[in-house]
Structures are given as C-alpha cells and as structure tokens.
Amino acid sequence: MTIKPFDLSKTVLATVFAISFASVSLPSSVFAQSGGSGSGGSSGGSSSGTGTTGTGTTGTGTTGSGTTGTGTTGTGTTGTGTTGTGTTGTGINGSGTTGTGTTGTDSTGTGTTGTGTTGTGTTGTGINGSGTTGTGTTGTDSTGSGTTGTGTTGTGTTGTGTTGTDSTGTGTTGSGTTGTDTTGTNRNTGVTASERTSDRGFDWGWLGLFGLLGLGGLARNRDKVRAYNDPNEVTGTRSR
C-alpha cells in the first residue's frame, strides 16, 4: 500500500491542528480545577506554544439561612346564647301572653397569621474560576389557624296562653199556651148589604117569599080543620 504525497500532507496538517487545539484548551480547565483559595488569579506568562495557563480562584458562596416565621394562633371566644323563657299567659276570654326568647350573640375569634422571614443566599463569584453559588434556605411560614368560636344560640320558650272559655247561661224560654177563640167566623165581614142577601148563589128574598106562602097555606088548613068540629058533619062530608 502506497501513501500519496497529497494524503500525507493532509494527515500531518490534521495532526498539528489537533495538537495545537488541545494544548490551548486543556491547561486552562486543568488548572482551574486545581486552583487554591487565593484572592487573585495569577496569570502565568509562558512563551511556549501551549497557551497561557490561568489559575482560577474558586469563589465560595455564603449560604443564606432563612428565619422561619411562626404564626400566632388566634383563639376564638365562644359566645353563649342566653335562653329566653317565655311567660305563659293565663287567658281571660282567650288572650294568652306569648313569651319571647332572647337569642345569644356569638363572639367569633379571629386567628393572627404569622409571617415567616425568607433568607436570601449570597452568591460567591470566582475569579477565572467556577464560583460555588450559595443556596439560600427559604423560611417556611407557619400560618396561625384561628379557632372560630361557635356561639350557642338561645332558644326562647314560647309561652302558650290558656284560652278562657265563657260559660254562657242559656235561659229556658217559657212557651205560653195561646188560647184559641171558638168564636164563629163571620163570612160577611167587609161585605155590603146587597151582597149579603146572596150566599152561595142563593137569593134569601125568594126563601122569605116561599116561607110566607107556606105560612098562609098552613093558616088556611087550620081554618078548614076547625070547621069540621062536628063528627056528623065530618061523616056526612066523607059520605059525599
């Protein structure tokens, strides 16, 4: 296998470039890791082709400590309701006095909430080095929980009025027996004299006329009987 001059020159150039790049970039990172706690970076001045070696001083961050706040817990005052007692009225004619219950008022407690102070970390800055950043510890707030007072509501006992009932006397009413008159009823009351002569469609004038004729006939018969007082005449008359 033969190597051409063109390929050989390309290989040499690539090798030189790789070595020069490594000599420039490698010492800065190596010396940065091995740097002490000096306050200033000392730059070495070298005439070699390997690059200038920097010595980085690593900064140390001061870690902030957060002060944790403690919340003050409020205590609620529990209200106690006063229970009203209703006065029971005794009703005269049903008027009951109704009692009114007094309702208690709740005093609700308010809790005071604590505020935590948050710590701030100071970040260290390294000279040509990698500074270690301080991490601040954040304070955690403890929130106070207020205990809410629960008021007992008073319940008023309502009085019930006793309704009076009137006993109304009931009078026994006497029933009078009304006498009934046996007096005959006059049908002709308020009737004129001309109307009284006709009752039920009959004319009393004709009745009187017939009565007179009857009486006259009876008178004649009596005269005839008186004429025959002698028995012989009666016999002679009968023989005829």
Image: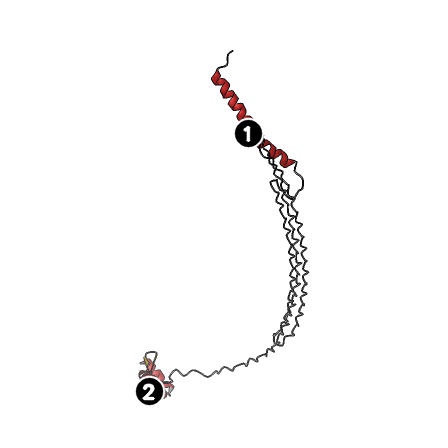
| Left or right of 65 on screen, residue 202 | left
Residue at the spot of label 1: 21
Q: Looking at the picture, how far across and down is residue 190, in whole percent?
A: 36, 85
The quarter of the picture where residue 129 lies is top right
Q: Earlier in the sequence, mark 2 or mark 1?
A: 1
Residue 195 found in image quarter: bottom left
Q: Quadrant of the C terminus?
A: bottom left
Furthest toward the front, the residue is: 47
Q: Callout 1, which amino acid?
A: Phe
Q: Residue at x 49, y 18 (%)?
A: 7
Residue 169, by quadrant, is bottom right
Q: Secondary structure at mark 2?
A: helix
The residue positioned 31% from the left and 86% from the top of the image is 194
**154 relative to 19, above or below:** below
Residue 113 placement (x, y as % from top left): 64, 57
Q: Nearer the viewer, residue 132 or 236?
A: 132
Numbered badge on residue 112: none
In the picture provided, is 177 more to the left or to the right than 115?
A: left
Q: Secondary structure at mark 1?
A: helix
Q: Residue 221: horizontal and vertical position, in percent?
A: 34, 85
Relative side of 240 to 70, left or right: left
Q: Amino acid at mark 2?
A: Ala
Residue drawn 36% across the image and 83% down it: 235
Give how far across and how far down residue 78 sits, in percent. 68, 63
Quick check: 9 above or below 88?
above
